[in-house]
Image (tube, rainbow, N blue to C red):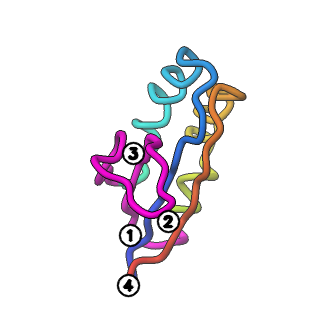
Amino acid sequence: MAKAYWVSAYRAVKDADKLAAYAKLAGPAITAGGGRFLARGLPAQVYEFGLAQRTVLVEFDSIDHARSVHDSPDYQAALAALGDGAERDLRIIEGV
């Protein structure tokens, strides 16, 4: 079974306090669900039409596993804490 990855790009951070509250809850919810943080932060370099946005890459054992962690009560609580504090693009993609 192929691994799955969350790729999250932050288009805008509107409220740093809400983002901090989200991070405090989201990190433990993701790792407790088996997610492994592979990268997070600003890009070292962008090319073509890339944007210098905070990006987070998390590995899961499968797409179903990634979905179940996203939909879990603990992660949903993290999203509620974030509220309108950031605009993000979150994708789940299957590894090759």
In the picture of the structure, the residue carrying the numbered disc 4 is 96
Residue visible at 45% across and 25% down in the picture: 24
Residues at marks 2 and 3, CA–CA distance in whole angstroms: 12 Å
Residues at marks 3 and 1, CA–CA distance in whole angstroms: 13 Å
In the picture of the structure, the residue carrying the numbered disc 3 is 32
Residues at marks 2 and 1, CA–CA distance in whole angstroms: 6 Å
Residue visible at 46% across and 29% down in the picture: 23
Between 76 and 37, the residue placed more toward the observer is 37
Numbered label attached to residue 61 = 1
Asked whether disc 2 touches disc 1, contact meaning CB atoms under 8 Å apart, the reply is yes
Amino acid type of disc 4? Val
Q: Quadrant of the N terminus?
A: bottom left
Asked whether disc 2 touches disc 3, contact meaning CB atoms under 8 Å apart, the reply is no
Residue 80 placement: quadrant: top right
Q: Does the magenta stretch include residue 34?
A: no
In the picture of the structure, the residue carrying the numbered disc 2 is 65
Q: In the displayed structure, would residue 1 be above or below residue 79? A: below
Q: Mark 2 or mark 3: name the one nearer the start of the chain.
A: 3
Q: Is residue 59 magenta?
A: yes
Q: Is 78 situated left or right of 60 in this image? A: right
Q: Is 47 situated left or right of 87 in this image? A: left
Q: Mark 3 or mark 1: name the one nearer the start of the chain.
A: 3
Amino acid type of disc 3? Ala
Q: Mark 4 or mark 3: name the one nearer the start of the chain.
A: 3
Amino acid type of disc 1? Asp
The residue most toward the right is: 84
Residues at marks 4 and 2, CA–CA distance in whole angstroms: 16 Å
Amino acid type of disc 2? His
Between 85 and 67, the residue placed more toward the observer is 85
